[in-house]
Image: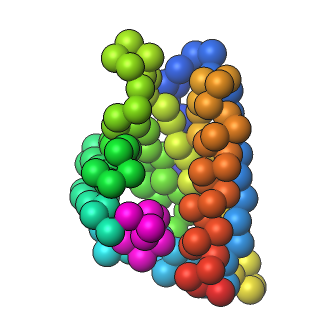
Amino acid sequence: MTDTPEIPEILADAETVEVDAFVTASTDAVWELFTTAAGLEQWWWPMFDDTRYEVDAQEGGWYRIRTSTGGFGVQGRYLQLDEGKRIVQSWDWLGGAEEGERFEQLVVVDFAETGDGTHIRVTQTAALDEVDDLRDGWQDTLTRLEELLD
């Protein structure tokens, strides 16, 4: 596997959202929180008691996170997993969008261990009208991760 794997193109004219976080935990610990149902349950959408997390974290595997209370969810495929370093996954919202308005997005999560913890960078493709909402959503989600680990 190369250091900078080729990212598959999902949407040719997509905008990009980029959000950074830092946690005082090893990349191994953070990796588990991103790639297991039990890990995601600790920080992803804890405000919804009925959130279900399904994860098959292997290249070509899939994930699905959904909540009836919130009325939405997300699912996708793992396109690339470089343990402790990078996750590349497709992203498809469940609920909330009219048929024909939905498109598969791309999410890249990069992890870099430092002496004090792990730097996390999430990059997601988005339609122009979703950029602000996605940035706010990732900042909120990653803040919960930071609070869990710090």
In the rendered image, the residue lying farthest to the front is 69
Residue found at x 40% / y 32%:
96
Depth order, front residue of 132/107: 132
Residue found at x 28% / y 64%:
50
How many numbered discs sit on the rendered protein?
A: 0
In the rendered image, the residue lying farthest to the top is 100
Residue 61 is a magenta residue: no
Q: Quadrant of residue 116?
A: bottom right
Q: Main secondary structure of the magenta part?
A: loop
> Which quarter of the rendering shows the C terminus?
bottom right
Depth order, front residue of 4/59: 59
Q: Is residue 63 visible?
A: no
Say how the picture is coloured: rainbow
Residue found at x 62% / y 31%:
130
Q: Position of residue 6 (x, y in %)?
A: 54, 35
Q: Quadrant of residue 101?
A: top left
Q: Is residue 100 above or below residue 51?
A: above
Q: Position of residue 97 (x, y in %)?
A: 41, 26
Q: Position of residue 117 (x, y in %)?
A: 68, 82
Q: Position of residue 40 (x, y in %)?
A: 40, 68
Depth order, front residue of 111/37: 37
Q: Which residues are magenta?
A: 41-48
Left-right relation of 22 to 87: right
Depth order, front residue of 103/113: 103
